[in-house]
Image (cartoon, helix red, strand yellow):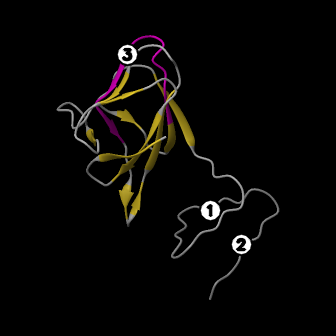
Amino acid sequence: MAQDLTTDGTPTVAGAQINGNAYINGRVRGERSILYVTTDDFDVSNITLLNVNSSGGSVNINGLSGGYSSDGLKQILFLSKVSGANTVTIVHNSGTGTQKILTPDGLDIDLQTYAGRVLLYDGTYWRVIKSA
């Protein structure tokens, strides 16, 4: 039997599982972090938005760590270049990455100024699934 959740404030739900459709009227908030340097294993546990600031030099993203995939749930990560200076490169299947990244065409991706990508963690690899 379906039941509605009603609250007078901000609800906190831990360990909830939705079996079916979820309709959200409003905003969904996730955690954000900033990356400044080349990485093989930047921890994206509980992160939804990763801003990459290359104002101090070029940044290669060889891999990530902390990606979540369990019980049919997959982590989605929005990656965004937030500076115009230097190059940000998503490296395809890097030999040094902890949780490696696969790109659709098997080539490295250089992000243009203020461009972004959407990545999905499948339990083994991060997969670039969309330009943003």
**Residue occupied by mark 3:** 58
Report the amino acid beneath label 3.
Ser
Count of numbered tags: 3
- Whichever of callouts 2 and 1 sits on the residue coming sooner in the sequence is 2
Q: Residues within 10 Å of mark 3 (few under 14, many from 20)?
A: some
CA–CA distance in space, label 2 to label 1: 10 Å
* Residue with the most extreme left position: 95
**Residue occupied by mark 2:** 5
Q: Nearer the viewer, residue 68 or 125?
A: 125
- Whichever of callouts 2 and 3 sits on the residue coming sooner in the sequence is 2
Query: Dots 3 and 1: beta carbons under 8 Å?
Result: no
Image coordinates for residue 60, horizontal then vertical, percent: 32, 24
The residue mark sitting in front, 3 or 1, is: 3
Query: Dots 2 and 1: beta carbons under 8 Å?
Result: yes
Report the amino acid beneath label 2.
Leu
* Residue with the most extreme bottom position: 1
Residue 31 to residue 51: above or below:
below
Image coordinates for residue 39, horizontal then vertical, percent: 33, 26
The residue at the point 52 percent across, 19 percent down is 83
Name the secondary structure under disc 1. loop
Segment colored magenta:
50-65
Is residue 54 part of the magenta span, yes or no? yes
Image coordinates for residue 58, horizontal then vertical, percent: 37, 15
